[in-house]
Amino acid sequence: MSSYYDLYKEKLTTPEAAAALVKSGDWLDYGWCTSHSYDFDRALANNLDHLRDVKVRGGVALWTPEIIKADPTGEHVAWHSWHSTGADRKAIQNGGAAFIPVKYSEILRLYRENVEPIDIMVFQVTPMDKHGYFNFGPNASHTQAILERSRTVIVEINEHLPFCYGTRENFIHISDVDYIIEGTQGKIAAMPAGTFDDVDMAVAKIITDEIRDGDCLQLGIGGMPNAIGSLLAESDLKDLGIHSEFYVDAFVDLSEKGIVTGRYKPLDPYTQVYAFAAGTQRLYDFLDQNPACVTKTVDYVNGISSISKIPNFVSINNAINVDLFGQVASETAGFKHISGAGGQLDFVLGAYASPGGRTYMCLSSTFTKRDGTMVSRIVPTLPTGSIVTDTRANAQFIVTEYGKFNCKGKSTWERTEGLINIAHPDFRDELIESAEKLGLWRPSNKR
């Protein structure tokens, strides 16, 4: 054991010395979500003047990297995001950063087969244990695949990172680490539990009425999924399971109320499985050293072959727009970049492949622009520039505060009528008129 600590001391370095390793043209990787670097990032931001064409990958940023703040136009270093948040969205829209389209379940393979070798990977880990291992915290995701492609590996210790159980792919041994930074121990950034309003609760009520004892849940991020979790926590449901790419605060509520047991999951029974987690400090405290919760690589968690083995799988996600063909846009609003494909399509496909499984795409029927104009989220065709996240062949239940509609097995005529029926009443006549012009309406349809 002492040899591990001797090795630890040999590999200790400062953030400034580690940042000095970066050369012009290098590819760097910050890992994923809560594993993004604090101290190395600050040191690199202070060392950009002599660098050109440095490229950094990351995803689901919970804070804006200092390198973006120091170089918002990307003159010296360019940020590349697998999945955007408010922390890097503006930089992408302004051209100082780029988005990398990915179907989340495929990201390990993309690293192993389709991306350039990584010159330096730097990411946060827990303190080393007596066996010489560092834990990745709630980020098994695709971290192992990044390590396999990295020439130099730098770990940044943060004692506030929760220790999360998983497979060997959620650990790195000191023998595989090149440099160690003892970080300033900043608190893990919180992702506040999404707030929800009356519309969110109306949508949540429609969906929660569909949940049955023994169902297995996947929840996306945002107000509506959290509203659903809040309602479920007050229900008399029992024996729910959790298998979700993203572990959210709502699952903590359900677990502490005893509603989640996982006893009917044939895959990973009695275990809550996730690829990564972010939320409030309460969530991190709940996951820390909790054997009921296990983080696994995303090719497993999001794989259709895994999801389809769990009967009565229920996938619940958000959408930005849905058009009358049943196409779902969840990444952009026209040309305005919002987030990314993530694992939404993984779960849309996987849940429908599950015996008794179903998938719900929820959205408010309208949104209000800054000038006070109310706009329908159900539209004749997706706005120019919109990215289709789920094709019309994949969509199942679309849910607004005005009801739910099952697109599966429905013709274009039936889809148009069903989707207009759950649009805001103020827009239904306008949508019918547009549908007639598109050849999606016939006289026998209801008015």
Image (cartoon, rainbow, N blue to C red):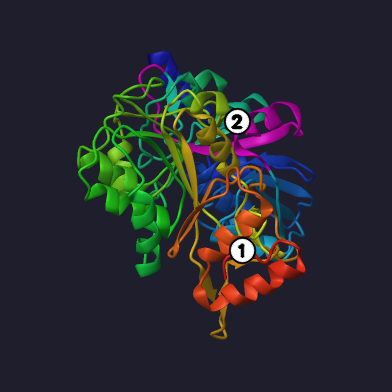
Q: Earlier in the sequence, mark 1 or mark 2?
A: 2
At label 1, which amino acid type do we have?
Answer: Asn
Write the residue at 65% across / 60% down: 324
- Classify the position of the C terminus by image quarter: bottom right
Query: Can you see residue 46?
Result: no
Query: Can you see residue 278?
Result: yes
Residue designated by label 1: 445
Q: Position of residue 113 (x, y in %)?
A: 74, 27
Write the residue at 41% across / 21% down: 267
Q: Position of residue 284 (x, y in %)?
A: 33, 43
Residue designated by label 2: 153
At label 2, which amino acid type do we have?
Answer: Val
Point out the stretch of residues depicted in magenta: 102-131
Whether residue 84 sits left or right of residue 438 in the image: it is left
Residue nearest the viewer, comparing 66 with 194: 194
Label 1: how many Cα within 10 Å (few below 14, some 14–19, many 20+): few
Of badges 1 and 2, the one in the foreground is 1
